[in-house]
Amino acid sequence: MKTKSEPMPSLKSDEDAERFVETADLSEYDLSGFKPARFEFQPKTAALNMRMPQGLLDALKRKAREKGIPYTRYVRRLIEDDVAR
């Protein structure tokens, strides 16, 4: 039984990733650092314009920066999560 996990290979394309998943034994890899990914497939065809206090906008931007995403995407995620509940 293996005690040390293999490092994940660098996958440069969707085809590389598909080939890897089809042929690899994923139990040999440490996947603990992986996070769920969200993919935005639908085109953005509508816009929302709102006014808010500067402090709230600054807080939104700070939270988005902590998550490593643009603040507009962070706001959209908040709305999507709330609507999905």
Image (cartoon, rainbow, N blue to C red):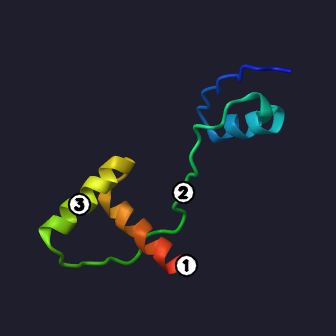
Q: Nearer the viewer, mark 3 or mark 2?
A: 3
Residue 85: which numbered mark, if any?
A: 1
Across and down, in percent, residue 40 comes to 51, 61
Residue type at the position of mark 1:
Arg
> Disc 3 on helix, strand or loop?
helix
Q: Amino acid at mark 2?
A: Arg
Q: CA distance from mark 3 to mark 2?
A: 22 Å
- Dot 1 or dot 3, earlier in sequence: 3
Query: Which x, y percent locates residue 73?
Result: 38, 61
Q: Quadrant of residue 77?
A: bottom left
> In terms of sequence position, does the residue under pointer 3 or pointer 2 come before the other?
2
Residue 13 in the image: above or below residue 39: above
Q: Which of the two discs, 1 and 2, sits closer to the camera? A: 1
Residue beneath label 2, please?
Answer: 38
Direction from residue 62 to residue 26 in the image, left or right: right
Residue depicted at x 77% and y 28%: 28
Where residue 67 appears, as percent x and y from the top left, is 38, 50
Of residues 10 and 30, which is closer to you in this image? 30
Rendered image: mark on residue 59: 3
